[in-house]
Structures are given as C-alpha cells and as structure tokens.
Image (cartoon, rainbow, N blue to C red):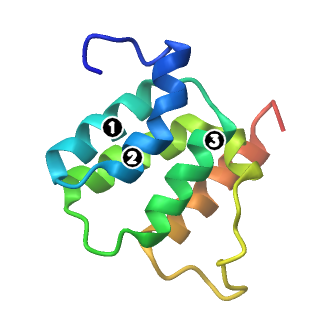
C-alpha cells in the first residue's frame, strides 16, 4: 500500500476494509495517513466515522491522523450515518470534531 498513491482508485476502494482489518497501531496509522491524503469518498467517510465513534482508547498520534482524514472528507461526511449522535452538546473529541468540520463546511463557499 505504501507504494501506491492515495489517489489510486484501487487504494481508495480498499481503505475502508483496510481500516476495519488494521489490528495494531502502526497498521492503523498507515491506513489513516493514506486516508488523509485520499480524495473525498462516501465509503471512506462512512468507514472513518464508524471507526471514530468506536475508537475509545486512541493515542494522540492516531487521533490526529484520524482528524486529518475526517477533515479531508469534508462534505462527504454529510452522507455518513450519524444516528448515534445525541441532541446534547458534544462530549467526545469525535463529536466535537464532526461538528467543527460540518460548521466549517456549512460556512464555506461550497455550502
């Protein structure tokens, strides 16, 4: 995967399953940094949101890589499943990050 570009359609298509299959922090970091360079994609944004909401114990490096990958998805995050979100104020870093991304996107010129 390291020899392929994040813009390669085969790599982009494989990222959601690679994210799910990654078992150790190093593998997850490779997948997340590749996702941070990938073009916005519906399947990838859904996989990132699913992984984010399930990732309770994550070190700072993985969290930053995940944040970059989520930010890269931008408007694609609007198509992700947010049924687990509460109407209350955000409490987790993931909830806060998603709201920040959506707010920036909504305030931008492409809204």
| Of the image marks 2 and 1, the number of the one nearer the N terminus | 2
| Of the image marks 2 and 3, the number of the one nearer the N terminus | 2
Q: Residue 98 at what x, y percent from top left?
A: 58, 60
Query: Dot 2 surroundings within 10 Å: few (below 14), some, or many (20 or more)?
Result: many
Tag 2 and tag 1, C-beta contact below 8 Å:
yes
Q: Residue 8 at what x, y percent from top left?
A: 49, 12
What residue lies at 36% left-to-right and 29% top-to-bottom? 34
| Residue, disc 2 | 19
Please tell me which residue lies in front, 102 or 28: 28
Left of 58 or right of it: where is 5? right
Calculate the distance from the C-alpha at mark 2 to the C-alpha at mark 3. 12 Å
Q: Residue 63 at what x, y percent from top left?
A: 31, 56
Query: Dot 3 surroundings within 10 Å: few (below 14), some, or many (20 or more)?
Result: some
Dividing the picture into quadrants, the one containing residue 31 is top left
Dividing the picture into quadrants, the one containing residue 15 is top left
Disc on res. 101? none
Q: Is mark 1 on a helix, strand or loop?
A: helix
Please tell me which residue lies in front, 26 or 111: 26
Please tell me which residue lies in front, 52 or 63: 52
Disc on res. 31? 1
Q: Is mark 2 on a helix, strand or loop?
A: helix
| Residue, disc 3 | 43
| Of the image marks 1 and 3, the number of the one nearer the N terminus | 1
């Amino acid at each position: 995967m390291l020899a392929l570009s994040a813009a390669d359609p085969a790599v982009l298509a494989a990222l959601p399953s690679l994210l799910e299959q990654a078992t150790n922090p190093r593998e997850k970091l490779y997948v997340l940094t590749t996702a941070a360079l990938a073009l916005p994609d519906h399947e990838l944004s859904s996989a990132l949101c699913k992984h984010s909401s399930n990732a309770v114990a994550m070190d700072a490096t993985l969290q930053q890589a995940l944040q970059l990958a989520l930010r890269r998805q931008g408007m694609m995050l609007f198509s992700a499943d947010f049924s687990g979100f509460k109407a209350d104020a955000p409490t987790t870093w993931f909830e806060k990050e998603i709201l920040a991304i959506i707010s920036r996107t909504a305030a931008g010129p492409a809204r």
